[in-house]
DNA sequence: TGTTAGCACTCTGTTACCCCGAGTGCTAAA
DNA sequence: TTTAGCACTCGGGGTAACAGAGTGCTAACA
């Protein structure tokens, strides 16, 4: 469909525009080493490329700019997997250099490094808490009427909530209850906790504990873990440096969108497959992101869970580099998190 | 020093400028109801006020703008404690409407509400974790070579850290160690934990536990709680809406400064006294904040600790309203957190 | 002596205009 | 098929003109 020469020209146009953010003209193209024909020839080819919709003009007599279709084609067919610089590689490895045992910590550092390497905004979604299983439940009395309930999961996540209980509740009742909860609920995924508490435990508790309903209610509330997981960000402000957002209104629109986390969550939550997904401009179906591309890497974590890793940048993004970085980091993360999570499945 | 008329004019100028962000001219002033003299008279007075340094011109023939000295005078001598709107009050009370038992939760909500009410950026610093005392230490084994250590403090804060230990360490050894730690360390402020662990516990552990040094090292790391506390933000992006930051470079400078949390921490950490402190423009001694004022409210929490609550806005800030809001909220927070903290001191 | 009207002057922001440079499309020649 | 040449277009930068808002000063007034 496209001649070799057209491919070459398209490639050079996109590469150049990604670097400079300036429309690319025929004359400047013909001066490049890669391109041996005169500007007139280039002009003819550009005219064809424009007709096919791969590039467009910002006004009648301006240079050309890649269209979304152009970027799409570029990403689908013209991306040569670019070798990462040694520097980048060692930066990424530095995340895992220290022996870290907390998922949150690793994930947060990943987000930070990724945003620093790319100068874009990074978003990381760790494994789903909801699928964590209860490892141990504990209650630590704090004051006369309050205590801390602590749930430790098999992956080492600790969830704690303070709650109050009627003052006439006896300490031994609480201990008894905690024992019951542990006997019955260890191994339950957090997502089922609330239900099982009400359905299975209620009867059991009724039999053994006075005032069971208040306790039950307290616990039910504790065990209502948030519906979706925390997103970790890196370089939230980085988009400020992109010339496409020198207009403060566009910037505000985007920032507001980023802050609305549930919205963003839907955009990057793990998809069916594993691997890299690129969404360009309007493909994101969001006005605030019309000038943005979102590259998401979904990676497996032991026990069938998935994590994802995303970079939000202008459509004029360094696709090749970002994809290489994401591929590399998602591989490493996959291993590191699987280590944390997999090991603990044994027990 | 200032005549009544000059006071009046200064007041009106500042009020007007705070509202409109536009330089105020003599003609528009003389049209106001409060002001009964001609524009010429006003001009004479403004000339005097400028000579005294309370207002300044942006260029030779522009209207006047309050100077930092002007704001300072306004804040120090002309602020009439403004009654809050019922709406604001109920918004603030809504923070405490539900019975919440987590400091973090309350503090985060406070920051959010405060930023929404003011359209500025709010920063809240909760009570110092370092002064929390150990209530209970627990270890939950996770996999063969790793476990979670959990420290619960008297205020209900839960700190957890995953750590690894040599595989040949016996379960009973760990239990033994935990018992020892609890016997000796309950009641210790977190800030002393690390030291005491090394100085007092080392000898003790040596006597009772094989491989004590590895365990000790693991625990020491866990108990290294971060040096200063987490800051909670509300409306980080709100400054984008202020006309003084329509220049994206100024905005970037400010945002970078906000992200550098340790820097900010020094600006708002509790000062000697209790109450409201206003820092205007260059008084903050920070280039990024030249056009900003920072209002900090420091409030007491039971047990001699302090919290602080700050609003970062343009120098052209609604001082009166913000101060009223801060006064009110810091009172409520003081009570609420004291409740959480005070009660627990009993035990 | 304090207040005010009047006037000349100053500065900003907007609009209109011009011109240059960069780019295009088309045509005709190689 | 490629290229040189040329007419045309558009944006951006610079300048001039002008209206509007404001000031400072002077002189008159109460």
Image: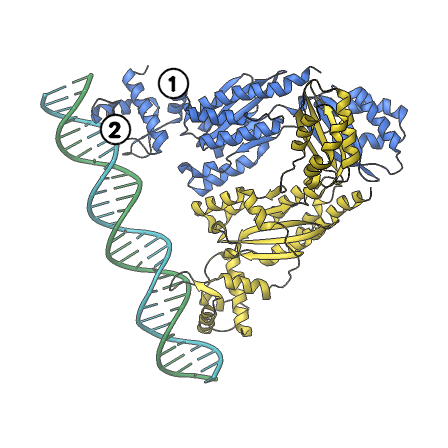
Chain colours: A blue, B yellow, C cyan, D green
Circle 1 sits on which residue?
A80
Q: Chain of mark 2?
A: A
Callout 2: 10 Å neighbours few (<14), some, many (20+)? many
Left or right placement of residue B230 versus residue A27 in this view = right
Q: Chain of mark 1?
A: A
**SS of the residue at dot 1?**
loop
Q: What residue sits 58% from the left and 46% below the top?
A: B265
Mark 1 or 2: the one toward you = 1
Where residue B17 appears, x then y in whole percent? Answer: 50, 59
Q: A117 and B85: which one is in front?
A: A117
Q: Is residue A202 above or below residue B284?
A: above
Q: Is residue A55 above or below residue B42?
A: above
Q: Is residue A249 above or below residue B81?
A: above
As drawn, the label of residue A26 is 2
Kindly report the distance in space between the C-alpha atoms of the residues bearing marks 1 and 2: 24 Å
Q: B154 and B88: which one is in front?
A: B154
Q: A258 and A285: which one is in front?
A: A258
Q: What residue sits 61% from the left and 23% below the top?
A: A127
Where residue A86 appears, x then y in whole percent? Answer: 42, 24
Which quadrant: the N terminus of chain A? top left
């Amino acid at each position: 469909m496209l001649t070799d020469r057209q491919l070459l020209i398209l490639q050079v146009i996109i590469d150049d525009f990604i670097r400079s953010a300036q429309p690319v003209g025929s004359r400047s193209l013909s001066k490049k080493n890669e391109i041996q024909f005169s500007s007139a020839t280039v002009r003819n080819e550009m005219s064809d490329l424009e007709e096919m919709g791969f590039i467009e003009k910002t006004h009648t007599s301006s240079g050309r700019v890649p269209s979304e279709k152009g970027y799409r084609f570029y990403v689908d067919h013209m991306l040569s997997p670019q070798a990462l610089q040694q520097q980048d590689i060692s930066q990424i490895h530095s995340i895992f250099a220290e022996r870290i045992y907390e998922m949150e910590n690793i994930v947060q550092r990943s987000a930070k490094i990724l945003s620093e390497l790319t100068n874009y905004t990074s978003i990381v979604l760790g494994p789903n808490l909801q699928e964590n299983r209860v490892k141990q439940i504990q209650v630590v009395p704090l004051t006369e009427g309050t205590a801390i309930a602590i749930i430790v999961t098999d992956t080492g996540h600790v969830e704690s909530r303070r709650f109050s209980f009627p003052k006439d509740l006896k300490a031994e009742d609480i201990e008894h209850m905690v024992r019951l909860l542990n006997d019955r609920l260890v191994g339950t995924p957090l997502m089922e906790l609330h239900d099982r508490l009400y359905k299975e435990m209620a009867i059991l508790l009724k039999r053994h504990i006075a005032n069971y309903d208040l306790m039950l209610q307290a616990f039910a509330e504790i065990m209502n873990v948030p519906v979706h997981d925390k997103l970790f960000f890196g370089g939230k402000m980085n988009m400020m440096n992109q010339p496409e957002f020198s207009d403060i209104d566009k910037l505000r629109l985007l920032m507001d969108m980023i802050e609305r986390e549930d919205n963003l969550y839907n955009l990057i939550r793990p998809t069916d497959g594993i691997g890299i997904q690129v969404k360009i401009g309007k493909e994101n179906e969001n006005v605030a992101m019309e000038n943005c591309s979102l590259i998401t890497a979904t990676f497996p974590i032991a026990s069938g869970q998935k994590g994802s890793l995303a970079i939000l940048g202008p459509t004029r993004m360094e696709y090749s580099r970002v994809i290489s970085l994401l591929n590399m980091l998602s591989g490493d993360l996959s291993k590191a998190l699987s280590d944390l999570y997999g090991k603990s499945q044994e027990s």
